[in-house]
Image: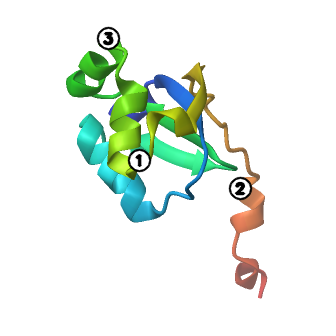
């Protein structure tokens, strides 16, 4: 099994008072010891996938919101609605005939 094909678990949380940028997300990822591909934000909802032992320790200590707040330089009160999430794999389907070269017909 390819390492990235494993279904990831993590937490989503609403972040108020700031609009995190890519460098902000990289800072959060570094603080949690996860890869930059394991954190994303959409519509004010930050999702962190637990992909490291360091991150698991932070979660076990109930300190995820504190670490995220510290990395974003915001108050922990600006983080709410923390929910456990399971990654939903997206199956990409396409018709190979769409990629055939029509020039072969000449």
- Residue that label 2 marks: 96
| Residue 92 higher or lower than 63, as above or below | below
Residue occupying image coordinates x 37% and y 63%:
23
Q: Nearer the viewer, residue 61 or 7?
A: 61
Indicate which disc residue 71 carries: none
Residue occupying image coordinates x 40% and y 57%:
24
Q: Is residue 86 left or right of residue 8?
A: right
Instruction: Indicate which disc, 3 or 1, sits on the residue closer to the N terminus.
Output: 1
Instruction: Indicate which disc, 3 or 2, sits on the residue closer to the N terminus.
Output: 3
Tell me the distance, in whole angstroms, between the alpha carbons under discs 3 and 1.
22 Å
Which marked residue is nearer to the observer: mark 3 or mark 1? 3
**Is residue 7 among what the camera can see?**
no
Q: Is residue 28 left or right of residue 101?
A: left
Q: Quadrant of the N terminus?
A: top left
Instruction: Indicate which disc, 1 or 2, sits on the residue closer to the N terminus.
Output: 1
- Residue that label 3 marks: 60
What is the secondary structure assignment of the residue under circle 1? helix
- Residue that label 1 marks: 37
What is the secondary structure assignment of the residue under circle 2? helix
Q: Is residue 101 left or right of residue 2?
A: right
Image position, residue 48 (x, y; %): 46, 34
Q: Nearer the viewer, residue 48 or 71?
A: 71
């Amino acid at each position: 099994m390819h390492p990235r094909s494993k279904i990831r678990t993590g937490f989503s949380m609403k972040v108020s008072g700031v609009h995190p940028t890519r460098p902000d997300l990289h800072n959060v990822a570094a603080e949690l010891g996860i890869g930059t591909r394991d954190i994303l934000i959409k519509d004010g909802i930050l999702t962190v996938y637990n992909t490291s032992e360091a991150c698991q320790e932070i979660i076990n200590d109930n300190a995820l919101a504190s670490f995220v707040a510290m990395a974003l330089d915001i108050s922990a009160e600006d983080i709410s609605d923390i929910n456990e999430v399971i990654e939903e794999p997206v199956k990409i389907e396409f018709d190979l005939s769409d990629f055939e070269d029509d020039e072969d017909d000449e």
